[in-house]
Image (cartoon, rainbow, N blue to C red):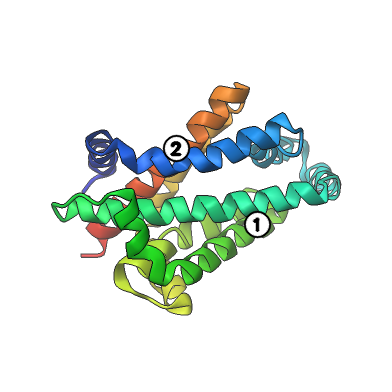
Amino acid sequence: MKLSEILSKSLDIVTAQPEILIPYLVPLVLALVAMWRHISNLIDWGMGRLSSLGSGPMVYYGYLVETIRGVRVEGWVVWIVALVVLGICVGLTIVQTNAHLSGGRMKVGEAFDAISGKLLIFVAAFLVCWFLKFVGLFFFWIGIFIPAVLLIFVGQAILLDNKDFLDSFIASYDLAKANWFDILVLLFIFFVILAILRLVPFLGTLVAIFLAGYSAVVFTVMYKDRKM
């Protein structure tokens, strides 16, 4: 499928089964509570670190280190908890999307049962992927997008093809390497949307959380299509 067809097919899946996005209400509530308690604005913090890239490498690096040092302990806890919850949501989306592509329909409870046997390894892999993206912040744009592109299919490899921890990274790398340009285009589209929406505090967070769900559908559709 072309990119336009993948995006259209993914939108059809979400509109036909909108309950796929229901689990994302949990990380949404976590993000809003964190903002309300002035602990951490998760979306604005992540996107905000990129805003100083145009000032030059040294200015960017100094700003990044300063802001990381300024994050309180409870901020890091919120980040980790939010990522774990978000990872579970993405896992549910992957298996529900796969069921839809196979002509079925999987409820949230059924999806949780389907991923429960692989939940620990999936969440661990999800956190490692995000950690590598975080490390990539220190290497500017290229450092962020390399792991984002090459590790995009780790979750699908674990949940849909029963790969173990290491093999899932290898499988994702092999498939992503063959489709890196299309993946990069999709990530850039989502990135631009986030960059714009972060200017609207509540709406930006709301759309960003559900965009994570839609993007999980998109890359699952791409995984099933390009793996053949």
Kindly identify which numbered label has been placed on residue 211: 2
Looking at the image, the residue that sits furthest to the front is 109
Badge 1 amino acid: Gly
Tag in front: 2 or 1: 2
Residue 198 pos. (x, y %): 60, 28
State which quadrant residue 92 falls in. Answer: bottom left
Total of numbered circles in the picture? Answer: 2
Examine the rendered structure and indicate whether residue 52 appears above or below residue 113: above
Name the residue beneath numbered marker 1: 136
Q: Is residue 93 left or right of residue 55?
A: left
- Which amino acid is tagged 2? Leu
Res. 177 visible in picture? no
Identify the residue shown where x is 50% and y is 55%.
87
Q: Foreground residue, 187 or 109?
A: 109
Question: In the image, is residue 18 above or below residue 79?
Answer: above
Front-most of residues 197 and 55: 197
Q: What residue do we see at 29% from left, 43% from top?
A: 3
Q: In front here: 125 or 31?
A: 31
Pointer 2 or 1: first along the chain: 1
Please tell me which residue is depicted at 41% across the width and 70% down the height of the picture. 118
Side of 41 relative to 19 (left or right): right
